[in-house]
Structures are given as structure tokens and as C-alpha cells.
Image (tube, helix red, strand yellow):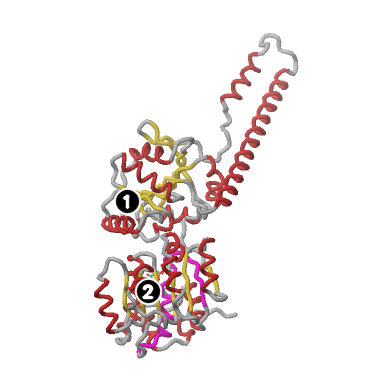
């Protein structure tokens, strides 16, 4: 099949084409190419792609195409998990209003005047609603001011983050009160298991489109492996903080519990810290978003998903505590430093279990330096994964034992024999080394399987 290449091929209305023209878009991005024609046919869609792939217009274009501004009712609803993300969508949607002056697009997020919004809604209903799930639910179900029951299209942007922040219940509450013919579109970077029951409940044979990340490895970013050994992440971080001066340091943790514990340890050490992850209650999360936007604190501890809502060009250093299950997220973690062409550095703290993750990343081409911060300075270590050094102290001892044996009476062929003995020892050592590595890997595999079984650690 011939792939569509230009927006002209979608047979869009002149106003929609004007919307694209105002944005300066000529050709659809891969996700737009897949989603727009499917959405125009009225099908439910799931778009799996990372930020920056053009998701927003993948749903705004079909909405613009379908919305009828002569009808006085809500036709499309778009939710995002944070105010900032909702705001970003709203800014892009406002361009539609410039083209169609009759079109009403409104933003409903927490922290804005609720009564004023209700007053306005008693006069007119918008055509397009953009907002956070909590406020939309409130205006629809509690205040009965916003009439979503007649809407045709419902878009959930950043669905995985919506789930992590506990907003899926809000959405569940009001999606159940929307029409049966509702077209549902969900966009997400990942598809966690916990999202599936929701998808199955509301979507009918959705088309799933997965667009790979186009993020390239940034050569300006240094990756430094730092061993934790038996120490905790907290202890290792506190120890190495003397080793660099960040403007803003973003610290990633695999679980909300770890994030909270690291933030606590840094705070106790007198550091200015913001923390942002799904484990926080909404008031604290809002507070953190505000602090982060204002750049108040030097350290920000976060989960992978929460970090997506943070737009920080001032990050100079990243610390990755362990490795995320989806290793691509490691690239994203590291990529948060070195924005805008400046150099970045990512310290990847590792424990024994991380051997496989590190090897996988190395195979994708990441070059790790290997260092430890000791007695106030960075010390370079043997390259990670390199074979044991040729001069192994234990083996040297055994060889020297061979050398001192009967030095005076040298039998013929002794040299050859000795050399053979040394080779045998070396072989033995090598086998031991390989055996221990296999054991290590086996252990890591078991642990990984157990962790997956335990589940709930997808953030
Ligand atoms: P996402 O919603 O996936 O995070 P955005 O919608 O913010 O991505 O798009 C990322 C950037 O790409 C934005 O600057 C947007 O203006 C631009 N963009 C989106 N679609 C196109 C297109 N078809 N052609 C050129 N640029 C585009």
C-alpha cells in the first residue's frame, strides 16, 4: 500500500488545512499518519509513542475536522494528568479558534476559579473541553454545569501518567456517564497492565499504533557507572555529591518508595529538594510542580513518568538509581541533562542485579565510564564487564609458589613443565570466573522474574 505523505491526502476541510498551515505543518509525523485517517473513520485508537512525536495534533486535527461550531454542545473532551500538560494542549487548540471564531475551546484545571467557570457554563457550553480529570469530573458530575453526556470524542492524553497519579478513577466516573457511541482515543508512552481493564471497558476494537522513539543517543552526554555495592542509593548519593556542582540535578528512582526515601535523605542532609511521583497526594504534587517550574530547588527526585511533566532546561546532572525495566527509559533519563546542545552527565548507580541491564545498554552502543567517588575524588575503575585483570593477586601468589619450588635442582624440561602448570592455573581461574559470572547472571534472572511476578513496579 502506498503510504500517505502529505496532509492534502487526508481530504480535510479548508479550515483544518488552514489550522495545519498556521502551524507550518506540511507532512504528517508517523503517528499523525496512522491516527488521523483512523480517527476520521470514527474508530477508537490507542497511540503509543513518546513525547515530542506529534501526538497532540494527531488528535486535534480529527477533532477540528469533525467539530461543528454551529451546534451548541460539547463535542470533544481532552484530559491530561497535570495542569501544565493541559495548558500546553490548550495553547495548541487555541489556534483553531483563530480560524473559526465561533468555536469555543475552554480549559478546566484545578487552581482556577470554579464559580466563574460554572457561571460561564450556564451561559454557553464550549465545543471543546480540555482539562485535568478532577476538575472536569467536578464540573460535570458534582456541579452539573458541564454537559459531557452528548460529546462525540474523548481523548485521554498521557494515559499511563494519568493512571500513576490516580486519576483513572475520576475518568472512569465520568466516562461511564458519556454516550454509548463515544469515540475514545488514548495516548500513552507505555501500556501498563493496570491500564488494560479500563481500555477493555471503554474501547471497542481499538486500533493500536506504536511509534518508536526517534530520540538519538546524544553524544554530548557522559554516562558514568557508579557502584553502590552493599550501600543504599541514599548513602551513595550523599557520598558523591561532593564530586560535582549541579545547577539542577534530576534524580530518578524506579519506585515511588525509593524516590520518597532519597528525597528524605537529601533533605536531612540540608539539601533543597523537590520530589515528584505518583505516591504524593495531589496538594503536595501541585506544590512540587510549582517549585520545579520556579526552579527553587537544586535537587529534584522523580519517577520516570512524573518527569515527563517537567520541562527543565536547567538540568545539568542526572542520577539514575538503578535501571528502569524498560531500558529505553534510561536513555530518556540521561537525555534530561545536556538539553539545548550543552553537555550533560548521567551517573548510573548500580547494584549487582543491574549487570544484565548494563550489558544490554552497552550492546546498544552506550559507552559507560566506570568511577567511584572516594576520599573526595573520582577514581576510575576497570571498564565495566572487562575480564578480570591478567595479574590477579591470588594467581600471582600461586605462580610465585611454583617459581620458588626447588630452585637449585632444575630437571630437564622443567621450564616447559612450569609453563604448563601456569597455563593450567590460568585456565582454572578463567573457568572459575566464567562460572561465577553465569551464577551471577542466573541470580539476576531469578530476581528479575520474581520482581516481575510481584508486579506493581512498572513506574
Ligand atoms: P507530543 O504531543 O507527542 O509531545 P507535540 O504535539 O508537542 O508532540 O509535537 C512536538 C513538536 O513537533 C511540536 O513542536 C509540534 O509543533 C511539532 N509538530 C507536530 N506535528 C508536526 C508536523 N506534522 N510537522 C512538523 N512539526 C510538527
Residue that badge 2 annotates: 141
Contact between marks 2 and 1 (CB within 8 A): the answer is: no
Residue drawn where x is 56% and y is 25% of the image: 393
Q: Residue 304, located in which quarter of the rendered image?
A: bottom left
In this rendering, is residue 350 above or below 74? above
Q: Is residue 56 magenta?
A: yes
Q: Which mark is residue 22?
A: none
Instruction: Return the x and y of residue 450 as percentages of the image width and height.
Output: 59, 47
- Closer to us: mark 2 or mark 1? 2
Instruction: Return the x and y of residue 120 as percentages of the image width and height.
Output: 26, 80
Q: Nearer the viewer, residue 353 or 68?
A: 68
Residue drawn where x is 48% and y is 84% of the image: 10
Q: Nearer the viewer, residue 105 or 145?
A: 145
Mark 2 neighbour class, 10 Å CA radius: few under 14, some 14 to 19, many 20 or more? some
Q: Residue furthest right?
A: 412
Residue drawn where x is 60% and y is 41% of the image: 443
Q: Nearer the viewer, residue 223 or 237?
A: 237
Instruction: Return the x and y of residue 236 as percentages of the image width and height.
Output: 41, 38
Q: Is residue 424 magenta?
A: no
Q: Residue 305, located in which quarter of the rendered image?
A: bottom left
Mark 1 and ligand 1: say if the CB distance to the nearest ligand atom is below 8 Å: no
| Element type at mark 2 | helix
Residue drawn where x is 46% and y is 76% of the image: 28
Q: Residue furthest bottom?
A: 70
Q: Earlier in the sequence, mark 2 or mark 1?
A: 2
Q: Quadrant where the N terminus lies?
A: bottom right
Residue stretch rendered in magenta on the structure? 44-69
In this rendering, is residue 33 above or below 413? below
Q: Which mark is residue 274?
A: 1
Spatial CA distance of label 2 from label 1 is 33 Å
Amino acid at each position: 500500500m502506498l503510504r500517505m505523505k502529505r496532509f492534502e491526502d487526508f481530504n480535510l476541510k479548508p479550515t483544518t488545512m488552514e489550522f495545519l498551515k498556521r502551524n507550518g505543518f506540511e507532512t504528517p509525523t508517523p503517528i499523525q499518519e496512522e491516527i488521523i485517517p483512523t480517527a476520521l473513520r470514527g474508530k477508537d485508537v490507542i497511540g503509543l509513542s513518546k513525547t515530542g512525536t506529534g501526538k497532540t495534533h494527531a488528535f486535534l486535527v480529527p477533532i477540528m475536522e469533525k467539530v461543528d461550531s454551529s451546534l451548541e454542545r460539547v463535542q470533544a473532551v481532552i484530559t491530561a494528568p497535570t495542569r501544565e500538560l493541559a495548558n500546553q494542549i490548550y495553547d495548541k487548540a487555541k489556534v483553531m479558534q483563530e480560524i473559526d471564531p465561533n468555536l469555543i475551546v475552554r480549559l478546566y484545571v484545578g487552581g482556577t476559579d470554579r464559580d466563574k467557570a460554572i457561571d460561564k457554563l450556564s451561559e454557553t457550553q464550549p465545543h471543546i473541553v480540555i482539562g485535568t480529570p478532577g476538575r472536569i469530573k467536578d464540573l460535570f458530575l458534582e456541579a452539573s454545569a458541564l454537559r459531557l453526556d452528548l460529546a462525540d470524542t474523548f481523548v485521554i492524553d498521557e494515559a499511563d501518567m494519568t493512571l500513576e497519579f490516580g486519576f483513572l478513577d475520576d475518568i472512569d466516573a465520568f466516562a461511564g456517564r458519556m454516550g454509548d457511541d463515544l469515540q475514545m482515543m488514548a495516548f500513552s508512552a507505555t501500556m501498563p497492565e493496570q491500564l488494560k481493564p479500563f481500555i477493555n471497558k471503554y474501547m471497542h476494537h481499538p486500533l493500536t499504533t506504536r511509534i518508536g522513539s526517534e530520540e538519538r543517543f546524544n553524544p554530548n552526554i557522559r554516562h558514568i557507572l557508579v557502584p553502590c555495592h552493599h550501600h543504599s542509593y541514599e548513602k551513595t548519593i550523599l557520598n558523591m555529591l561532593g564530586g560535582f556542582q549541579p545547577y539542577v540535578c534530576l534524580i530518578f528512582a524506579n519506585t515511588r518508595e525509593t524516590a520518597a526515601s532519597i528525597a528524605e535523605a537529601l533533605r536531612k542532609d540540608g539539601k533543597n529538594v523537590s520530589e515528584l511521583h505518583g505516591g504524593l497526594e495531589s496538594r503536595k504534587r501541585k506544590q512540587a510542580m510549582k517549585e520545579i517550574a520556579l526552579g527553587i530547588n537544586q535537587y529534584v527526585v522523580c519517577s520516570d513518568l512524573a518527569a515527563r511533566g517537567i520541562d527543565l532546561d536547567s538540568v545539568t546532572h542526572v542520577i539514575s538509581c538503578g535501571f528502569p525495566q524498560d531500558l529505553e527509559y534510561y536513555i530518556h533519563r540521561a537525555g534530561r541533562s545536556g538539553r539545548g546542545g550543552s553537555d550533560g552527565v548521567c551517573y548510573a548507580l548500580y547494584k549487582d542485579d543491574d549487570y544484565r541491564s548494563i550489558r544490554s545498554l552497552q550492546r546498544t552502543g552506550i559507552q559507560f565510564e566506570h568511577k567511584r567517588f572516594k576520599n573526595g575524588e573520582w577514581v576510575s575503575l576497570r571498564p565495566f564487564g572487562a575480564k578480570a585483570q591478567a595479574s590477579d593477586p591470588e594467581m600471582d601468589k600461586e605462580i610465585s609458589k611454583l617459581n620458588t619450588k626447588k630452585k637449585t635442582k632444575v630437571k630437564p624440561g622443567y621450564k616447559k613443565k612450569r609453563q604448563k602448570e601456569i597455563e593450567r592455573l590460568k585456565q582454572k581461574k578463567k573457568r572459575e570466573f566464567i562460572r561465577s559470572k553465569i551464577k551471577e547472571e542466573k541470580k539476576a534472572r531469578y530476581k528479575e522474574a520474581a520482581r516481575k511476578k510481584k508486579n506493581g513496579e512498572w513506574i
